[in-house]
Image: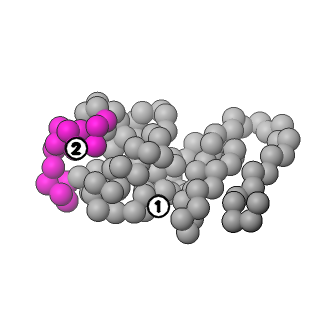
Amino acid sequence: MPGRPREVVKDPAPHPQPLIRAVLVLGGWLLSANVPDAGLPLYDNEKLRAWRRAAGLSREQVWAEVGCSVAWLQELEQGTSGRSPSLDLLTRLAKFYGHEPAELLTTSAA
């Protein structure tokens, strides 16, 4: 069907590293793929903390507006959670701080 993205599914070759689901927002398109987990963050935790501090907000104030727990927000800002946040949460946080979600994505270790 014209104008609709097609899903390409390939049988992945065995890989020594576990695979993670990577998501990229590019020109209004949401692209996702299974990629090797290189231990890199999918988001920039330092940016999250800097945006909150620049806004002069406490984690409790952000929690009240965005709806994630204070403990989860702290783990995200410190990069210590060991799990990735949802794209929805990253989008809500970026929009709350007045930024685009793509600004949080990173390809290198923070």
First along the sequence among labels 2 and 1: 2
Residue at the (20%, 39%) spot, across then down: 64
Residue 97 location in percent, x, y?
27, 57
Confirm whether the magenta stretch covers residue 26. no
78 or 97, which lies in front? 97
> The residue under label 1 is which amino acid type?
Ala
Residue at the (40%, 44%) spot, across then down: 89
Confirm whether the magenta stretch covers residue 64. yes
> The residue under label 2 is which amino acid type?
Glu
Which residue corresponds to mark 2? 65
In what element is the residue under mark 2? Answer: helix
Bin the neighbour count of mark 1 within 10 Å (Cα to Cα): few under 14, some 14-19, many 20 and up.
Answer: some
The answer to whether the residue labelled 2 contacts the one labelled 1, judged by CB atoms less than 8 Å apart, is: no
Q: Is residue 84 left or right of residue 4?
A: left
Which residue corresponds to mark 1? 102
Q: Is residue 19 left or right of residue 58?
A: right
Magenta stretch, overall SS: helix
**Quarter occupied by residue 16:** top right
In what element is the residue under mark 1? Answer: helix
* Whether residue 59 can be seen here: no
The span shown in magenta is: 53-68
User: Compared with residue 22, is residue 29 higher up or lower down, i.e. above or below?
Assistant: below
Residue at the (42%, 58%) spot, across then down: 101
Furthest residue to the bottom?
27
99 or 78, which lies in front? 99
User: Compared with residue 14, is residue 93 higher up or lower down, i.e. above or below?
Assistant: below
Residue at the (54%, 65%) spot, across then down: 28
